[in-house]
């Protein structure tokens, strides 16, 4: 048995403008090569574009986009008796939110467009409307879990 101390769950800091931890989480995932000010600039430009396009609060659009892209179940590879099974498991909320943020950013990076800020804003708007690449990825994950439901007893 390990005698090391458990790590403190640590509360994520909030960003300076919106005072929201989800925004800070998104900034930390945008981050490349330690350029946090650039990541903040990208996100704030995207939020401004969302506000101009939809006329709604960009923070509520962001929350809605993350909610729509968050998966409930996922599949984990499990090796049993020499063969590997894709076993469906429930996703805890924190992990689901992390997956949603990752998928939103991946989808916005794959979009063809002018710059990251506009691509991110369009992806957030699409996800809030329950379509877009990140929501499609969630659907694929749920479909895969449903197809492998027979292996749920291997959990």
Image (spheres, helix red, strand yellow):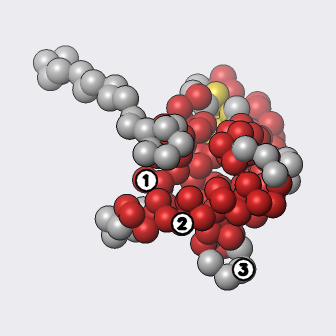
Q: Are marks 2 and 1 in contact (CB under 8 Å)?
A: no
Q: Which residue is mark 1?
A: 28
Task: Give whichever of discs 2 and 1 has the lower sequence position.
Answer: 1
In which quadrant of the rendered image does the N terminus lie?
Answer: top left
Which secondary structure, mark 2? helix
Q: Quadrant of the C terminus?
A: top right
CA gap, disc 2 to disc 3? 16 Å
Residue 2 drawn above or below residue 141:
above
List x then y, in percent, for residue 153.
66, 23
Judging by the rendered image, the residue that carries numbered circle 2 is: 42
Up the image or down, 86 lies above or below 46; here it is above
Q: Is residue 33 left or right of residue 45?
A: left
Labels 2 and 3: the sequence-earlier one? 2
Residue visible at 60% across and 37% down?
A: 96
At x 43% / y 68%, what residue is drawn?
Answer: 38
Is residue 69 among the parts visible in the rendering? no
Q: Nearer the viewer, mark 2 or mark 3?
A: 2
Q: Position of residue 21 (x, y in %)?
A: 48, 37
Is 145 located above or below residue 45 in the figure?
above
**In the drawing, what numbered circle is on residue 112?**
3
Horizontal and vertical percent position of residue 101: 59, 49
């Amino acid at each position: 048995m390990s005698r090391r101390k458990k790590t403190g769950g640590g509360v994520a800091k909030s960003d300076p403008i919106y005072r929201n931890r989800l925004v800070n989480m998104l900034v930390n995932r945008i981050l490349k090569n330690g350029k946090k000010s650039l990541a903040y600039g990208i996100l704030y430009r995207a939020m401004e574009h969302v506000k101009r396009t939809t006329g709604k609060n960009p923070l509520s659009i962001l929350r809605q986009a993350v909610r729509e892209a968050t998966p409930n179940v996922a599949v984990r590879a499990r090796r049993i008796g020499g063969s590997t099974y894709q076993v469906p498991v429930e996703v805890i909320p924190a992990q689901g939110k992390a997956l949603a943020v990752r998928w939103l950013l991946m989808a916005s990076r794959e979009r063809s467009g002018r710059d990251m800020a506009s691509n991110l804003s369009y992806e957030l708007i699409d996800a809030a409307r329950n379509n877009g690449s990140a929501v499609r990825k969630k659907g694929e994950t749920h479909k895969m879990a449903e197809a492998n439901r027979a292996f749920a007893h291997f959990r």
